[in-house]
Every structure is written in structure tokens, then in C-alpha cells.
Image (cartoon, helix red, strand yellow):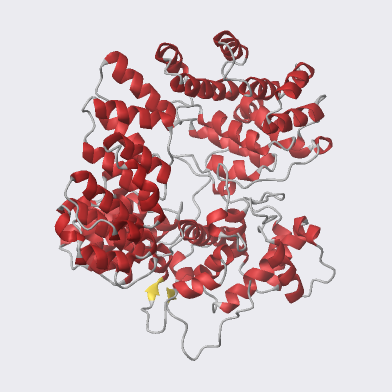
Amino acid sequence: MLFTPILTLITLCGTLFFAVPAAAQNSTFGVPSAKGDDAMVEMNMAFKKGDRKRMATLLPTLAGHPLEPWAAYWELRGRIESASPAEIQDFFTRFAGSYQEDRLRNDWLLQLGQKRDWTNFSAEYPNYRMGDDKEVRCYALATENALAGLDVSIQAKSLWFAQRDADDGCSYLASRLYTAKKLSDSDIWRKARLSVEANRPKAARLAVDIVAPDHAAQLSELVDNGARYLSKRLVAVQKANREMVVLALIRMASNEPDAAALVLDSHWTVHLSAEQRSWAWGAIGKSAAQRLSDDAPAYFAKARDADLVDEHLGWKVRAALRKNLWKDVLGAISAMSAEAGQDSTWVYWRARAVLKLAPSDAQRADALASLQTIAGPRGFYEQLALEELGQRVSIPLRPSALSADEIEAAKQNPGLKRALAAMALGLRTEGVREWNYSTNLHTKGGMPDRELLAAADLACRKEVWDRCINTSERTKSVMDFEQRFPMPYKDAVIARAKQIELDPAYVYGLIRQESRFIMDARSGVGASGLMQVMPATARWTAKKIGLDGFKAQDITDRDTNIAIGTGYLKLVLDDFAGSMPLAAAAYNAGPSRPRSWRGASGAPVLEAAIWAENVPFSETRDYVKKVLANTTVYAAIITGKPQSLKARLGLIGPRDAGAPASNTELP
């Protein structure tokens, strides 16, 4: 994103929002216009407005339309609270096997759960194929607990702790299990802590209301100002009081980690248990690490790793990497949950830590074997692992060609056909959801690799590049990098890149991450086109590169978008002395942020991989890693030679004192 405010970036299903074309432009993707297209677009608008009367009028006119299941879904979904079970079942029968059938079933199960209609819920739940709604799953566990007497506490905690936002299903389940003594006080307070730390006060209040209802009313004051809350409470005797102190310290740490550390050390340490102190120090350490504070490792050192959650431990690793504390890196990763420890990020850094700590021959062999489990061209740490093993990034051989039957089967898949028709009509959100559903199959293991390749091939042929890429990326045993890393608009992109002395692989790596090559991509905050350019930045860059006569609407023109996007990227890259990681961060978060993330004069020079892993914003951290990994793959494709990600990363430290001042003009 060419500087979009980080916390307001809106994405959906791995894609951006898109402009809705008129129905008359429905020839996109080679999908012919159908009678009733205008009515279908109007039906969608009526659904978004909640205009039930208009939907009821339009529905009969859409009988036989390729997207009739969507129209029928919108009409019934709009009045699901009053719909009869017979109407719901009739819909399931008419559109059996479709995404719309299971989408409505998801909605209906939520209704039944909210009404506590466990008999009908239990009858319908086994038919639910989607299976990805955590609230529905919580309702299902509630029925298993209530009707079958099963102990579902382990599954319930996993779901509830993972839910960032408050919902009825998991809160209801937790309350029932707590009453039945299947969840402990500590379990409930853990949820409250996670919620306060994630800035989800409603979810925190629901948790506190279960375990200490007389304290729930204090949550607003605590969330509003943790320091003031603590100043009014000088003694914490009861467990509930102590837990509220922990919540206040967590809240205070999110804004003022050093002040929270002082308050904890000076007063509250003696009142809290070792576990409570550890969590508070973990929250303080995390907040300090996100500010790139040198004090973060010292804060983390006051906590027991065993009492910290994966989020704390991840930031402990990052802070330790910045300070070259490899023993702390190894200890924190070893304390992570089994699931987190398997993430390629922590597999890589654990192996690096072992190799740094003068290992025995057996330990070295174990570390290298761990790297081997993730090494490959797929992603950032996979590529780095490959290089640690002495290899470079090259393109895998293509799988055997798809047969005519495999290609035809994808073309005739009803869900894929409907998805393409929806996207061609401008209903991209609906099309993407149906495409994802149809390629997932909702069976163990999902769609087989060859079928995924055929579906990706269909999307590529229709130039639906985001579905082409995302579908192909899901194959497990085979990889087709021509699908995963397509090069649309090749002549225009390479010509422009060479003209301004930019690496075309870098440009492609960035576009792939920004828009997935969708021309009319538009973010929720107004960035547009292939290179996701913001209007103000487009105007500024147009003047800088001498693009005379530029108008705001020109940004959607392919060549103009490429010219402005690459022009800005070149200016940013030059400002950061050719550092691709810094320039990528600047393109996503604005130049001022990566300047500050470099550290003040005297800050250590870091491997760029360590610097990137310490980027405070999760979106930008992920962005930088993906753009650089993409760039390395595209370089291998363009040159036909193995490539090095490490060479592109380099080292990052503070700007040299004698270097020219940063271009503060850059927006």
C-alpha cells in the first residue's frame, strides 16, 4: 500500500475492495452478459440497504439467472429472524451442495443458538460443511455438553481464548462450563487478560461478568485509564481485586510501559502472585519491544517464560534478537506452544540460536535438520532456511501439464462458474467467497492438488489473478510457480522499471503483494490500481516525475498507475540508499516510520531479517517479508538463475551521521 494508514487498511479474503462496474460491462473474464444482470446488481444493493420489500419484488424476476442462488439467499437472509423452519429447509433443498446453502445454514445455526433451540440446532449442525465459524462451534460444544454430558472444556478454552471479539456463543459456553466447574477462575481471568491486551473491552467485560460480576462495572474506568484506576486502589487482598490490578497494569503497559514497570515494581509486586507478576511483565515487555526500547529484555527477564503466552514470547524473541541475546531467543521459543513453535518464523530463529550458541555436533545436526523441514522457495523464512543450508532460491520444475479432462472439469464446476459470473458482474466479494468455498470442498485435506491446479489455471486464463495465485498457493505436494507468480502486463512493467533503473523483480514483488494484479483494486481508504496509490501521493509523485496534465481519475489507468507507483518507489528506494526492506516498509507505512525504526545514532547494525521481524506494525512486518520473498522468486524467473534473498536484505542500521538528510518531502 503506497502509504495507507496502517490501522485502517481493510482487506477481505486476501484481496482488496474493488470498484463495482455497471452490469453492461459484464463481459469481463469472458463471461457473457445474462438477462437480469441489472436486476441482480439492484438486488445486491437492496440487500446491503436492508430493503426487504424491494428484494421480494425483484426475486421472481431473477428465476433462472446464473446467480439466482445469491438472490434467493439475500432475500431469505434479510428476514431470517422471522423465517419459518420450513422456508429454511426448502432453501437447503433447492440449492443443495452450493455455497449459498451452507452460508444460510451458518446464519440459521447462529439464530438457533441465540434462541437456545438446541433440538433444531443439533439436528442441523451435522449438515454444516463450512465449519469455520467459531461461534457456531461454541454453540455445538454447548449442545454436546448439555445434551450428551461430554466434557468439552479443552475445546471450549481453545476457541474462546482465540476469539478476539465478544460473541454470544463462546461467552454462553464459557459461562455454562464455569457454573458446572469445568472452567476455573484462572481460565476466565485469562480470557479477560487476553481481551484487555488486545484492546477488546467488551469481551473483557463479558469474561469478568462470569467470574466477578461485582467488578465488571469497573472495566470502563480501568480501560479508560489504567494508571488512575491503580492509584485509587492501594491494597489488593482478594483474588478478584488482584486480577483487576493485573488488567489495569496490562492496560497501562499498552500506552506507558516504563510507567507501568515503575508502578509494578514499587507497589504491586508484593500483592500479586508469581504468575500474575509474570503476565504483567510480559505485557510490559511486549509493549516496550514494540517501541524498540532497549529496556524490553530486562522487563521480560522478570517474568517466567512458562507463565507467558505466545504473543509475549514472540516479542521477547524479537527484543532478544535486536540485542544479540541468543540464549534468550532459544529459551523463549522453547517455551512457546507446540503450534506456535512449528511456525516457520520460530523454526528458523530457533535453529539460528542453536547454531550461534557453540553447539555440539548433535545439536548442530538437529538445528540443520530443523531448517531442512522448512527450506524451500515458498516464503521468507523458507528461503532464508534454504540459504542457511548453503543453497539459493530457484524455481521448481512445473508439474505435468493438466489434461483436457482436468481443465474441462474446472470449467464446468458450478461454484467456480458462479464465482466468475459474480465477479464479472462486479460482485467481487461474493465471487471470492464462492470461489474459496468451491476450491476448499470442506472435506479433510481440501481439494486435491491437481484440481487446485486446474482451478488456478481457469482463474489465470480468465485473468482473475488473485484467485489464480491464492488457489495455486494451496497445493501441498506440487508447486506451479508460473501460476503462483504470474507476470501480467510484462512489457509495460519491465520497460518502465528499466527506464528508471528499478529492478523489475522488485516491482513485480511489490505489485503481487499490493493488488494481486487486479487493475480495479481499491482499498478501504482510497488507494487505487495495480500499485495501490493514494490520491495525494499520486498528485505529488506526478509532479516529481514530470507527468504533466495528471488528473485524479487517471490513477486507474494501467500505465499511469505503473508510472506513478514505480516513480514513488524509486524515490523512496533512493532515499533509503537502495535498501529494499526499508523502501518496502516506507511504501506500506510511509517514510517517517521506517526512519524511526532504524534507531537513533549509535543503534546497532542489524541483519535486515532481524530488523524486519522487529517492525512494530504486524501488517508492515508481514508486507516487507512477503515483498522481499516475492522479489527473490521473480528475479529467479526473470533471470533463469538461482537467487539470494540475503543479498537483497543486507544490513540495516541508523543513518550515518555524515549522510545527506532524509527527503522529508516524501509523503
Q: Is residue 175 above or below residue 646?
A: above
Q: Is residue 411 left or right of residue 215?
A: right
Q: Quadrant of residue 41?
A: top right
Identify the residue at horizontal 34%, vertical 27% (top origin): 173
Relative depth, front residue between 223 and 281:
223
The quadrant the C terminus occupies is bottom right
Please report the residue visible at 25 percent of the width from the left and 54 percent of the height from the top. Answer: 279
Picture layout, residue 433 above or below residue 284: above
Image coordinates for residue 1, horizontal then vertical, percent: 60, 59
Task: Locate residue 602: give its quadrant.
Answer: bottom left
Residue 298 pos. (x, y %): 24, 69
Q: Nearer the viewer, residue 311 or 508?
A: 311
Q: In the displayed orientation, state which residue is furthest to the bottom.
A: 658
- Residue 373 position, x and y percent, is 32, 49
Query: Outermost residue toward the top?
Result: 86
Q: Which image quadrant for residue 356?
A: bottom left
Q: Residue furthest front?
A: 232
Residue 70 visible in image: yes
In the shown orientation, is residue 666 left or right of residue 646? right
Q: Judge left or right: residue 129 versus residue 499.
A: left
Is 442 located above or below residue 397 in the figure? above
User: Visible in this render: residue 371?
Assistant: no
> Residue at 47% of width from left, 41% of height from top?
478
**Number of disc labels:** 0
In the rendered view, does 256 fall on the left or right side of 93?
A: left
Q: Relative to 68, does residue 346 appear above or below in the rendering? A: below
* Front position in the image: 259 or 313: 259
Please state the horizontal and vertical placement of residue 327, each as a whole percent of the image: 21, 65
